[in-house]
Image: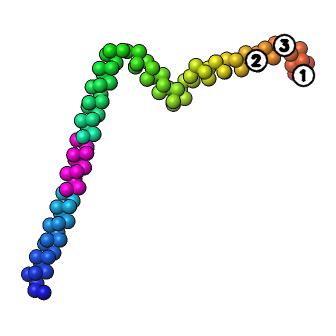
């Protein structure tokens, strides 16, 4: 094989490699543009929904706060209130016993 043939083969390999990288980068750009368009469309849809019914916004915030355990849902709140009431009732019922134990 002559030196010029080797150079041509190496050039073709380099060209193929460069074309492959270019194609991958173009694919990533297309995906990123699609994601940006999807995001823009999603924002637009969400805005329209909120304009139509603002209570949706309140519900979404409440769900997010519950998921992140910033607040508790109604069922958990009711359970906690029942438990607090039971404890309070027991303390009221056995107040004398607790005071005697505390002495």
Q: CA distance from mark 3 to mark 2?
A: 10 Å
Q: Which residues are magenta?
A: 23-33
Residue 17 pos. (x, y %)? 20, 65
At x 29%, y 25%, the residue is 45
Q: Which residue is mark 2?
A: 86
N-term-proximal mark, 1 vs 2: 2
Q: CA distance from mark 3 to mark 1?
A: 14 Å
At x 18%, y 63%, the residue is 18
At x 36%, y 15%, the residue is 53
Q: Nearer the viewer, mark 1 or mark 2?
A: 2
Q: Which residue is mark 3?
A: 93
Q: Which numbered tag is attached to residue 17?
A: none
Q: Residue furthest left?
A: 4
Residue 72 falls inside the magenta stretch: no
Which SS type dominates the magenta stretch?
Answer: helix
Element marked by disc 3: helix
């Amino acid at each position: 094989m002559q030196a010029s043939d080797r150079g041509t083969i190496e050039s073709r390999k380099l060209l193929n490699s460069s074309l492959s990288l270019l194609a991958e980068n173009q694919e990533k750009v297309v995906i990123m543009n699609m994601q940006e368009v999807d995001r823009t469309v999603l924002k637009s849809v969400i805005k329209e929904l909120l304009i139509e019914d603002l209570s949706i916004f309140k519900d979404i915030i409440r769900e997010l706060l519950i998921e992140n355990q910033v607040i508790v849902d109604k069922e958990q709140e009711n359970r906690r209130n029942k438990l607090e009431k039971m404890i309070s009732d027991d303390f009221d019922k056995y107040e004398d016993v607790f005071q005697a134990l505390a002495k």
